[in-house]
Image (spheres, rainbow, N blue to C red):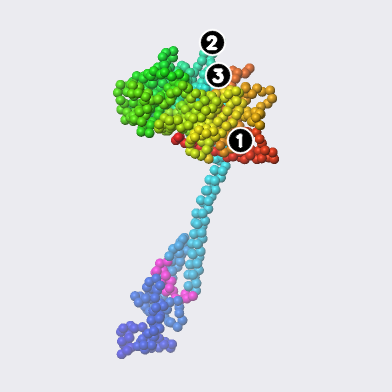
C-alpha cells in the first residue's frame, strides 16, 4: 500500500546503492533534515530555476555536489533531457558570444544564469570557464573606465596649457605691437606761434582708443607766387596710427572742439566745431555736417543743458560778447537736435573786468540748475530765469523749472536775478570744478562727465596768486593759499589717501618755475620743487594709477638743487638759465616724491597737451601739440605727438631732486628702487566723483 500510495502521489524517493527498489516512507522519515538543507542550498540566487518546485523533472544538486544522483532513467525522460541539454548548450553558447561582444558593464539575465547552472555535467570546469569570461569582461570594463577618466583629465589640461601658451606668447606680442603703434609724430599745418589750438580727445573710429581732434591752420599758395592765404580746418587723427581720419574745412579759425553729444539713437558720436561766428555739429566718424548756426562773437565753449524742448536730446548754451560795445554778455540757447536757436538771446550787463569765466552748469543738492559766469568775478543765475527770458514762458521740463531757496536767499536784493558767487577787488583767473580728469578733456559733452562736474565744489584762483576751494553747498571758502602768480590752470589728482583731490599748479618768477601740490582738504603744502623757468605756459596733467594715487605730468627745464643757501643747476656751462633751449617732460608719483622720471626732452615749444587712458592696456597716451621753429630747410610747423606712457617710462631717466646725496651708494639704491617702481606702474581711469 505504501508503494501504491507513493506512486500515486509521486513523492520523491531515495534509491539505494544497489539501484533497487526504495521505500518512500522510509526516505521521508530518514531524510527530512537533509532534504530541507538541500532545498535551501539549491534555491536559485536570482529567482527560480528550471529545477525548482515549479519545474518538471527530477531535482538535481547545484554545482555537482557528490553523493547525489540524477533521478529517473527511463528512455523517454533520457531523450527529453538529451534534447533539453542540446537546447541549453546552444543557448549558453549564444549567451557567451553576446557577452563577449558587449562593451562596458552589462548584467546577465536570470534565465541565462539558470541555464548555466543547469549544466551540472560541466562541473568545476564549467564554473572556471564562466569565471574566466567574467574576469576578462570586468578587465575590459575597467580599462575603458580608466581610459575615459584619463581623457576627461588630459583633454582639459591640454586645452588649458594651449590657452596659457597663447596668452603668454601671442598677447604680449600684440600688446607690444599696439604700444609701438601708439608712438607717432605728425606735422599738421603752420606752427601758429604759442597760442594753444583747439584740442579734444574722443573715440571717433570705434577702436576703444580716444582719437585726437585738432584745430589746424595752413598756408596755401594763390594764383600768384606772392599770394598766400590761410585755410582753417578741424582734423581728426587716429590715435593708434596717426593717420588723418577726416578734415572739415572752416571759414574761420577753430576755437573749440567738443565731442560726446548724444543725438537721439544715432550711434556715431557728434562733435561740435566752434569758431568765432559759427557753431557746427558734425558726425564724429565721417566729419559730415549735421547742422550749423551762425552767431556773433562767440566767447565760450558750449555748455550741455538738460533737455529743454522735451525732444529727448540735451540742449546747449553759448556765451557771446560783442566787441567794441558795452559789456553786454549774451547767453543763447541752442537745440541739440536741430541747431536752431531756442527763443531769443538773453543779455546781461556786466560791470566787472577781466577774462570771461564760464559759463558753467551747476546742479544744487535740491536738483535746481544754475549757470555760473562772469567777467573777473563769478555770479550765478537760475536756468529757469534764462529760459523764461528767452522763451517768454516756463519750459516743459520739470527739472528746469525748479529753484533752490538756499541759493535764492543769497541774492543781495530782490531787484536782481544774480547770485553772487565771488566778487572782490582782485580778478578771478580760474574757476574749475573739483573733479578728477577735468583738465584732460574739460570740453567733453559726455552727459555722465557733465553730471559729475555740475555737482562738485570749485577751485578758485583769484588775484593771480590766491587759491581757494569754494564749497558749493553754502559758497564759503574752505581754505586759502597764497603763492607767487599762477599762470596756468591747475591739475587735480590724489597725492595722499584722504579721498580728497589735491591741486597741482605752477608759478614763475625771477627765472624760476616752482611746482607745488596743495592738499585739497586743508590747503597745506604737500610737495614743492624748483626748476629753471622754461618760458612756456602749459597746463600740467594728472592720471590715476593702480595704487589709487595719481601720477602728475608737467613740463619744465633743469631742476634747481640747493646746497646750503646756494642755488645749483645741472645745466651745461654757458647756457643762460633764463632762456633754456631744452624742455623736459617729467613724471612725479607720490610714492617717491624726491625722484622724478624724465620721459622726454625737446627743443620744440609745447603749447597744449592732454592724457588719454587706455583701459585694455592699463596704459595711457600723452598727446602733445608743439610749435617747431623754422629751419633753413623747413618752415615752422605744428607737431602732434603721441607717446605711450609705459613705453616712455621704460626709456625714462630718474632725476633726484635732493641735493644732499649720501655717499656709499645710498642714493644709487634709492634710484634703482624708484626705477623699478616706475616700471611696474600701471594706470586706471580716474574716478569722476569729487
Q: Secondary structure at mark 1?
A: strand
Of residues 569 and 423, the one drawn nearer to the viewer in this rendering:
423
User: Mark 1 or 2 closer to N-term?
Assistant: 2
Residue 300 within the segment the image draws in magenta: no
Q: Badge 3 is on which residue?
A: 193
Residue in the picture at 45% in, 76% down: 63
* Residue 150, above or below 167: below
Query: Which is closer to the viewer, label 2 or label 3?
Result: 3
Q: Secondary structure at mark 2?
A: loop
Rendering coords of residue 336 (x, y %): 38, 25
* Residue 112, above or below 382: below
Residue in the picture at 43% in, 25% down: 422
Span of residues in magenta: 108-124
Rendering coords of residue 510 (x, y %): 60, 23
Of residues 555 and 302, the one drawn nearer to the viewer in this rendering:
555
Q: Quadrant of residue 576?
A: top right
Amino acid at each position: 500500500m505504501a508503494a501504491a500510495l507513493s506512486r500515486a502521489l509521486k513523492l520523491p524517493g531515495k534509491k539505494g546503492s544497489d539501484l533497487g527498489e526504495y521505500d518512500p516512507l522510509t526516505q521521508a522519515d530518514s531524510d527530512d533534515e537533509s532534504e530541507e538543507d538541500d532545498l535551501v542550498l539549491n534555491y536559485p540566487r536570482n529567482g527560480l530555476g528550471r529545477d525548482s518546485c515549479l519545474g518538471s523533472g527530477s531535482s538535481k544538486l547545484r554545482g555537482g555536489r557528490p553523493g547525489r544522483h540524477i533521478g529517473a532513467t527511463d528512455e523517454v525522460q533520457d531523450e527529453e533531457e538529451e534534447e533539453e541539454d542540446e537546447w541549453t548548450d546552444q543557448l549558453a553558447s549564444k549567451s557567451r558570444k553576446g557577452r563577449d561582444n558587449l562593451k562596458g558593464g552589462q548584467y546577465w539575465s536570470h534565465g541565462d544564469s539558470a541555464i548555466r547552472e543547469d549544466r551540472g555535467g560541466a562541473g568545476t570546469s564549467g564554473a572556471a570557464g564562466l569565471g574566466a569570461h567574467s574576469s576578462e569582461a570586468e578587465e575590459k570594463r575597467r580599462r575603458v573606465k580608466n581610459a575615459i577618466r584619463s581623457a576627461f583629465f588630459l583633454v582639459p589640461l591640454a586645452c588649458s596649457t594651449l590657452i596659457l601658451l597663447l596668452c603668454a606668447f601671442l598677447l604680449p606680442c600684440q600688446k607690444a605691437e599696439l604700444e609701438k603703434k601708439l608712438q607717432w609724430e605728425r606735422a599738421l599745418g603752420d606752427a601758429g606761434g604759442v597760442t594753444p589750438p583747439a584740442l579734444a580727445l574722443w573715440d571717433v573710429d570705434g577702436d576703444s582708443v580716444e582719437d585726437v581732434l585738432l584745430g589746424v591752420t595752413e598756408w596755401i599758395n594763390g594764383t600768384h607766387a606772392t599770394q598766400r592765404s590761410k585755410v582753417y580746418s578741424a582734423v581728426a587723427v587716429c590715435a593708434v596710427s596717426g593717420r588723418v581720419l577726416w578734415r572739415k574745412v572752416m571759414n574761420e579759425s577753430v576755437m573749440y572742439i567738443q565731442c560726446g553729444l548724444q543725438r537721439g539713437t544715432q550711434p556715431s558720436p557728434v562733435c561740435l566745431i566752434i569758431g568765432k561766428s559759427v557753431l557746427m555739429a558734425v558726425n564724429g566718424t565721417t566729419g559730415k555736417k549735421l547742422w550749423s548756426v551762425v552767431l556773433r562773437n562767440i566767447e565760450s565753449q558750449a555748455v550741455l543743458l538738460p533737455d529743454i524742448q522735451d525732444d529727448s536730446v540735451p540742449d546747449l548754451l553759448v556765451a557771446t560778447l560783442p566787441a567794441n560795445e558795452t559789456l553786454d554778455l549774451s547767453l543763447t540757447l541752442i537745440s541739440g537736435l536741430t541747431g536752431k536757436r531756442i527763443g531769443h538771446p538773453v543779455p546781461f550787463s556786466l560791470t566787472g573786468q577781466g577774462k570771461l569765466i564760464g559759463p558753467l552748469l551747476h546742479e544744487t543738492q535740491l536738483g535746481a540748475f544754475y549757470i555760473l559766469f562772469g567777467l573777473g568775478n563769478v555770479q550765478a543765475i537760475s536756468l529757469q530765469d534764462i529760459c523764461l527770458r528767452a522763451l517768454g514762458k516756463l519750459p516743459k521740463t520739470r527739472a528746469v523749472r525748479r529753484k533752490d531757496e538756499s541759493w535764492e536767499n543769497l541774492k543781495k536784493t530782490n531787484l536782481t536775478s544774480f547770485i553772487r558767487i565771488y566778487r572782490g577787488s582782485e580778478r578771478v583767473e580760474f574757476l574749475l570744478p573739483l573733479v578728477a580728469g577735468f583738465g584732460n578733456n574739460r570740453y567733453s559733452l559726455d552727459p555722465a562727465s557733465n553730471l559729475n562736474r555740475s555737482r562738485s565744489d570749485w577751485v578758485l584762483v583769484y588775484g593771480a596768486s590766491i587759491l581757494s576751494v569754494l564749497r558749493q553747498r553754502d559758497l564759503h571758502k574752505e581754505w586759502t593759499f597764497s603763492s607767487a602768480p599762477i599762470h596756468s590752470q591747475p591739475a587735480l589728482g590724489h597725492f595722499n589717501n584722504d579721498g580728497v583731490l589735491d591741486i597741482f599748479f605752477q608759478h614763475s618768477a625771477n627765472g624760476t618755475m616752482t611746482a607745488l601740490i596743495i592738499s585739497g582738504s586743508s590747503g597745506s603744502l604737500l610737495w614743492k620743487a624748483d626748476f629753471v623757468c622754461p618760458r612756456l605756459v602749459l597746463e600740467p596733467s594728472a592720471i590715476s594709477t593702480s595704487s589709487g594715487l595719481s601720477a602728475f605730468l608737467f613740463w619744465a627745464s633743469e631742476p634747481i638743487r640747493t646746497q646750503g643757501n646756494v642755488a645749483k643747476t645741472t645745466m651745461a656751462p654757458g647756457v643762460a638759465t633764463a632762456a633754456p633751449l631744452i624742455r623736459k617732460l617729467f613724471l612725479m608719483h607720490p610714492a617717491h616724491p624726491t625722484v622724478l622720471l624724465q620721459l622726454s626732452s625737446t627743443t620744440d615749444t609745447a603749447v597744449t597737451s592732454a592724457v588719454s587712458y587706455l583701459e585694455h592696456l592699463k596704459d595711457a597716451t600723452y598727446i602733445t601739440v608743439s610749435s617747431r621753429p623754422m629751419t633753413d630747410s623747413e618752415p615752422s610747423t605744428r607737431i602732434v605727438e603721441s607717446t605711450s606712457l609705459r613705453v616712455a617710462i621704460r626709456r625714462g631717466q630718474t632725476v633726484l631732486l635732493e641735493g644732499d646725496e649720501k655717499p656709499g651708494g645710498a642714493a644709487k639704491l634709492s634710484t634703482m628702487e624708484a626705477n623699478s617702481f616706475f616700471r611696474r606702474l600701471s594706470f586706471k581711469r580716474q574716478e569722476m566723483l569729487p
